[in-house]
Image (tube, rainbow, N blue to C red):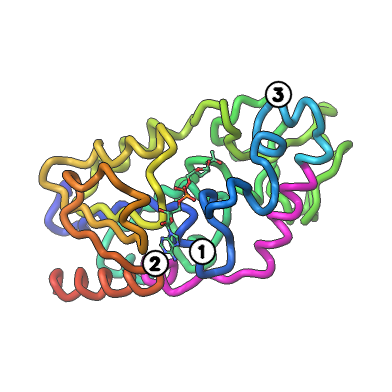
Amino acid sequence: MSDSNEKPVLVVLSGAGISRESGLKTFRDGDGLWEGHDVMQVATPEAWRADPELVLEFYNQRRRQLDEVEPNAAHRALAALEEVFDVRIVTQNVDDLHERAGSTQVLHLHGELRVVRPEDDPGLVSDEWIKVGGPELPGPDVVLGDTDERGVQLRPHVVWFGEAVPMIEAAAETVAQADVLLVVGTSMQVYPAAGLIHYAPADCRVAMVNPDPESVRGFESVVHDFIVAPASEGVVQWADRLQQERG
Ligand code: OAD
């Protein structure tokens, strides 16, 4: 926090668990599959080369599913905290539920379902990427033959297994500015995302919300407040307490 007139910086690291109660599955639900698919067949550069149609259809399904779900109380509580805090969300999720709840600063570490980019683009953020649902590409489906103006096929703007995470530096810089850090709904098993917690300043208070402490073992030493609850309860409780403390 640089100036006493500025709002304190609250950084949120969120993962699939925060969207669970909206009806979107987490990745490590137990069956080893992601929405019934082996991730290696739908979420790798090899899969894209081998069967782009299948990969596009998988993400088309995920995109259609977004129209059937709504932000839950946890997404909404974080959006409401913007009244008191400078809330910066770093999410591993490719859904748009934080934005739809009203959060204004959301960094998508692993990409966004509603964005596509030319397949020859390395994946850094660009205003020129195409929003699915916009005038260029009404969507929700993206199919083989949907190209940019050069004729290059469009691919999902998601980080696949084996690909670099271009936004990781920006995310680390964000965490390094945190006065308060909340980690919610992530198993912290996937690097480099899981390493972000270590960028928090020494005097930053760190909270974690997760109904299954076993799934996040190994982080006990860096977390001050562990709330064992699903996001819709745990985040709301924690946010209420935080607002009371900050008056
Ligand atoms: P995971 O599926 O690994 O972990 C989900 C976490 O959410 C677990 O710790 C659960 O205990 C917790 N959880 C379940 N229900 C919850 C609820 N109602 N409220 C709060 N927490 C709940 O998901 P991520 O950690 O997000 O990457 O996975 C990280 C990355 O792995 C994903 O972004 C994806 C995947 O590989 C890429 O696609 C690159």
- Callout 3, which amino acid? Asp
Q: Nearer the viewer, residue 24 or 39?
A: 39
Read off the residue under disc 1. Answer: 20
**Percent position (x, y) of residue 36?**
69, 52
Whether tag 2 and tag 3 are in contact, CB under 8 A, the answer is: no
Q: Nearer the viewer, residue 203 or 228?
A: 228
Whether tag 1 and tag 2 are in contact, CB under 8 A, the answer is: yes
Q: On the image, which quarter does residue 199 sit in?
A: top left
Which one is earlier in the sequence, the residue at label 2 or at label 3? Answer: 3
Can you tell which mark lies on residue 120? 3
Can you tell which mark lies on residue 110? none
Q: Distance between the residues labelled 3 and 1?
A: 33 Å
Give the secondary structure at mark 2.
helix
Magenta stretch in the rendered image: 56-78
Question: Label 1 CB, ligand 1: below 8 Å?
Answer: yes
* Residue at the image point whose x is 49% and y is 68% from the top: 101
Question: Label 2 CB, ligand 1: below 8 Å?
Answer: yes
Give the secondary structure at mark 1.
helix
Rendered-image quadrant of the C terminus:
bottom left
- Of circles 2 and 3, the one toward us is 2
- Callout 1, which amino acid? Arg
Q: On the image, which quarter does residue 240 sit in?
A: bottom left
Read off the residue under disc 2. Answer: 231
Which one is earlier in the sequence, the residue at label 1 or at label 2? Answer: 1
Which one is earlier in the sequence, the residue at label 3 or at label 1? Answer: 1
Identify whether 61 is placed above or below 71. above
In the rendered structure, does residue 69 fall within the stretch colored magenta? yes
**Percent position (x, y) of residue 74?**
41, 69
- Callout 2, which amino acid? Ala
Identify whether 45 is placed above or below 9. above
Identify whether 153 is placed above or below 212. above
Query: Which residue ends up furthest to the front in the rendered image?
Result: 31
